[in-house]
Amino acid sequence: MRTLLVCPDAPSMLGSIVHLRDQLREWYECLPPHARLIQLGTDSHIPLKTSIYYVHLLHLGAVMLMFRHCLAGLRSFEDREGLSIEQRKVMDEVLNDGILAAQSSAQMVYMIREASRSVRHCWVTM
């Protein structure tokens, strides 16, 4: 995420975001089948399931950081209309992914808490 901080303009920022998004997708695709979220509904081993949820929370946190950076970029890059159609599409995808990541994170935190019967903790995201 460090490369996002040194981008002087919207095209550079979006280029960095595309690169990081591709890396995150590649990481997810390399996960073993038992570590994918779709498999967790069938696995009854609670400690393993909880550990995998924590890994996915970190992944979703990275997605939310890209969302946050896009929002910050919208303020500092004056006018979104100056972006090309492709750049606007990328920004819209990142913003939609960020919202989905936040919703998924909230669901995972709830499932972790329910599955482990843990006490409530304060979760700070981003």
Image (cartoon, rainbow, N blue to C red):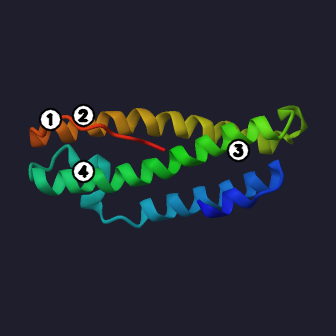
Q: Earlier in the sequence, mark 2 or mark 3?
A: 3
Disc 2 and disc 1 in contact, CB within 8 angstroms: yes
Q: Earlier in the sequence, mark 4 or mark 3?
A: 4
Within 10 Å of disc 4 (Cα), the crowding (few <14, some 14-19, many 20+) is: few
**Which label lies toward us, 4 or 3?**
3
Asked whether, in this view, residue 60 is left or right of residue 120, the answer is: right
Q: Earlier in the sequence, mark 4 or mark 1?
A: 4
Q: Which mark is residue 91?
A: none
**Which label lies toward us, 1 or 3?**
1
Q: Which residue occupies 67% across, 55% down? A: 18
Asked whether, in this view, residue 24 is left or right of residue 5, the answer is: left
**108 or 118: which is nearer to us?**
118
Q: Which mark is residue 114?
A: 1
Going by the numbered disc 1, the residue's amino acid type is Glu
User: Disc 2 and disc 3: Cα gap in Å?
Assistant: 30 Å
Q: Is residue 29 above or below residue 73?
A: below
Asked whether, in this view, residue 60 is left or right of residue 70, the answer is: left
Q: Which mark is residue 39?
A: 4
Q: Quadrant of the N terminus?
A: bottom right
User: Disc 4 and disc 1: Cα gap in Å?
Assistant: 18 Å
Q: Earlier in the sequence, mark 2 or mark 4?
A: 4
The residue under label 3 is 90
User: Disc 1 and disc 3: Cα gap in Å?
Assistant: 36 Å
Going by the numbered disc 2, the residue's amino acid type is Tyr
User: Disc 2 and disc 1: Cα gap in Å?
Assistant: 6 Å
Within 10 Å of disc 2 (Cα), the crowding (few <14, some 14-19, many 20+) is: few
